[in-house]
């Protein structure tokens, strides 16, 4: 391990964890077995993060590294704000000898005054929808229980409040293209001197048979199939996922010949727009990618009905290629955002592979592609799931874990217990079990009259003894239920209990109990 290059130690990858999100819980029902969009899925993300860091540490265990806890002046770091990775709970989460920083954040964004929100939505003054977002969030607890909402007509209730990325890209490029044409019309000789507007390239790998195109609606299918590069100032590339029969076929036929072309189109965009704006390619470029783990080979079958999947190693390779592209054309500026995924195994394995890919190609060369792929194979994923399985009464902890663990598993649990602040599930107050039978006395009868009346007949509500006599009644009932059919009269298709002999001393009210059919 000592012969690995030292540049692996550069803390080039920062993972931002928003602790407030971990407190979100699905509360509509205790049974979440059929609920795929659970906020608690973030726990699986943290498991994947912990496992990736643990594996990278073990591969570099004989080297020395550092972790920084400093503030950055760039807009991204400032928006996350309030860094807190110190304290006893975060001590074991500090990555050792790996190019990764874990940053816990409690930042918030003012939606009404944020420049990015205003840029996308324009002038929001007087926009009832946007201005009411904060109010709706505060009132959501009450709104969930009612039928009416204040969401404007035409907006879905609780889903898809924001336009998709492709829609935003088209809108931004359209405006920048319009400004360029207007400037050129005013002074054709000065168009190159005008400060260019923002331009975006949007590339996507997706399943054209799944949501929102599953019903085959023309406009949605067309939008998910757009491929345009330059005309009208638009740069969009959509690539449809295809089925495969083996990993060899996936890498040689699909990834190399089809999926990887999204980076080629992005490179053409950077070079062409740089030439238009008369500056060096990459001076003003930043790369954003999103992790759609719902395409994982480990996703629920119900959420991957059309067989458009990718192997787990895809998330490692794609992230590695994205880093290579960012280093070449964006001075290494790359932001990866969690997007989708439903099963815990899909999330755990995808996050592991993705983080290892984000550490860069040097890590892959130093550690070895084959070694990395073993980290997220089914056998090791099973061990990881077993070690981090939620115990009754709360999340996994070092004390609850078995003492004999592989070193990487032990380290994974240490890191996970430090970064995971998921609240334990609320425990219901135990309720004392009800008595087998509880009889209530509704009528007053003479104490010396043991003869049955109309009210004691089957089909009527029977009188009950006092609580002190209940044991006697139940004991006799058990004797009756084990007897033959002749021991009980049958009235109206139901068995009725014969007269119970009154004990000596105090007389009991006559009790008639209805029994169900004999099993």
Image (cartoon, helix red, strand yellow):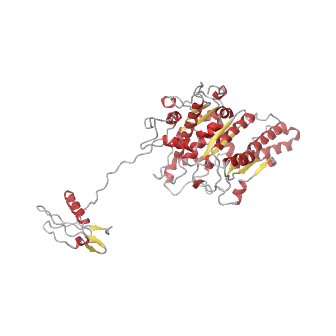
As rendered, which of 74 and 264 lies closer to the eye?
Answer: 264
As rendered, which of 206 and 142 lies closer to the eye?
Answer: 206
Give me the residue at 51% from left, 29% from top.
Answer: 91
Where residue 499 appears, as percent x and y from the top left, is 19, 69
As rendered, which of 347 and 71 lies closer to the eye?
Answer: 347
Where residue 403 appears, as percent x and y from the top left, is 44, 35
Question: Residue extending furthest bottom?
Answer: 492
Q: In this view, does 484 lie to the left or right of 8?
A: left
Where residue 435 appears, as percent x and y from the top left, is 28, 57
Q: Can residue 109 be seen in this view?
A: no
Picture quadrant where residue 58 is located: top right
Above or below residue 449? Residue 388 is above
Q: Can residue 432 be seen in this view?
A: yes
Question: Residue extending furthest top?
Answer: 64
Q: How many dots with numbers?
A: 0
Question: Residue extending furthest right?
Answer: 189
In the rendered view of the protein, which quadrant contains the C terminus? bottom left
Picture quadrant where residue 266 is located: top right
Give me the residue at 59% from left, 31% from top.
Answer: 59
Where residue 16 appears, as percent x and y from the top left, is 59, 36
Give me the residue at 50% from left, 56% from top.
Answer: 146
In the rendered view of the protein, which quadrant contains the N terminus? top right
């Amino acid at each position: 391990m000592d012969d690995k290059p030292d540049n692996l130690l550069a803390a080039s990858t920062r993972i931002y964890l928003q602790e407030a999100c971990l407190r979100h819980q699905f509360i509509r029902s205790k049974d979440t077995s059929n609920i795929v969009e659970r906020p608690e899925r973030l726990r699986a993300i943290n498991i994947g993060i912990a496992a990736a860091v643990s594996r990278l540490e073990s591969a570099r265990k004989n080297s020395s590294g550092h972790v920084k806890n400093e503030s950055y002046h760039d807009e991204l770091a400032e928006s996350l704000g309030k860094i807190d990775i110190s304290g006893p709970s975060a001590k074991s989460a500090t990555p050792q000898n790996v190019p990764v920083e874990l940053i816990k954040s409690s930042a918030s964004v003012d939606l009404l005054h944020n420049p990015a929100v205003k840029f996308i939505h324009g002038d929001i003054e007087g926009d009832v929808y946007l201005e009411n977002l904060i109010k709706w969030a505060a009132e959501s607890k009450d709104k969930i229980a009612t039928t009416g909402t204040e969401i404007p007509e035409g907006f879905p209730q609780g889903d898809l409040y924001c336009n998709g990325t492709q829609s935003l890209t088209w809108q931004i490029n359209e405006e920048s293209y319009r400004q360029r044409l207007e400037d050129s019309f005013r002074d054709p000789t000065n168009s190159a001197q005008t400060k260019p507007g923002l331009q975006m390239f949007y590339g996507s790998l997706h399943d054209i048979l799944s949501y929102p195109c599953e019903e085959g609606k023309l406009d949605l299918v067309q939008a998910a199939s757009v491929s345009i590069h330059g005309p009208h100032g638009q740069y969009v590339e959509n690539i449809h996922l295809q089925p495969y029969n083996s990993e060899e076929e996936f890498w040689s036929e699909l990834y190399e010949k089809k999926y990887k072309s999204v980076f080629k189109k992005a490179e053409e965009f950077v070079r062409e727009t740089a030439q238009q704006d008369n500056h060096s390619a990459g001076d003003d470029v930043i790369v954003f990618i999103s992790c759609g783990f719902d395409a994982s080979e480990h996703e629920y079958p119900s959420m991957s009905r059309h067989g458009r999947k990718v192997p787990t190693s895809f998330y490692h390779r794609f992230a590695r290629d994205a880093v290579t592209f960012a280093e070449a054309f964006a001075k290494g500026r790359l932001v990866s955002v969690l997007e989708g995924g439903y099963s815990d195994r899909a999330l755990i394995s995808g996050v592991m592979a993705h983080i290892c890919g984000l550490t860069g190609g040097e890590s892959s060369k130093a550690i070895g592609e084959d070694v990395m792929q073993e980290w997220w194979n089914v056998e090791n994923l099973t061990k990881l799931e077993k070690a981090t399985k939620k115990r009754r009464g709360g999340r996994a902890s070092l004390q609850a874990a078995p003492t004999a663990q592989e070193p990487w598993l032990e380290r994974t649990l240490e890191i996970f217990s430090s970064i995971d602040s998921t609240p334990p599930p609320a425990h219901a107050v135990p309720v004392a079990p009800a008595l087998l039978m509880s009889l209530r006395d509704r009528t007053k009868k003479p104490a010396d009259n043991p003869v049955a009346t109309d009210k004691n007949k089957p089909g009527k509500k029977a009188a009950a003894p006092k609580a002190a006599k209940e044991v006697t009644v139940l004991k006799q009932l058990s004797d009756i239920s084990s007897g033959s059919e002749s021991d009980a009269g049958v009235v109206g298709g139901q068995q009725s209990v014969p007269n119970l002999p009154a004990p000596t001393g105090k007389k009991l009210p006559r009790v008639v109990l209805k029994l169900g059919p004999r099993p």
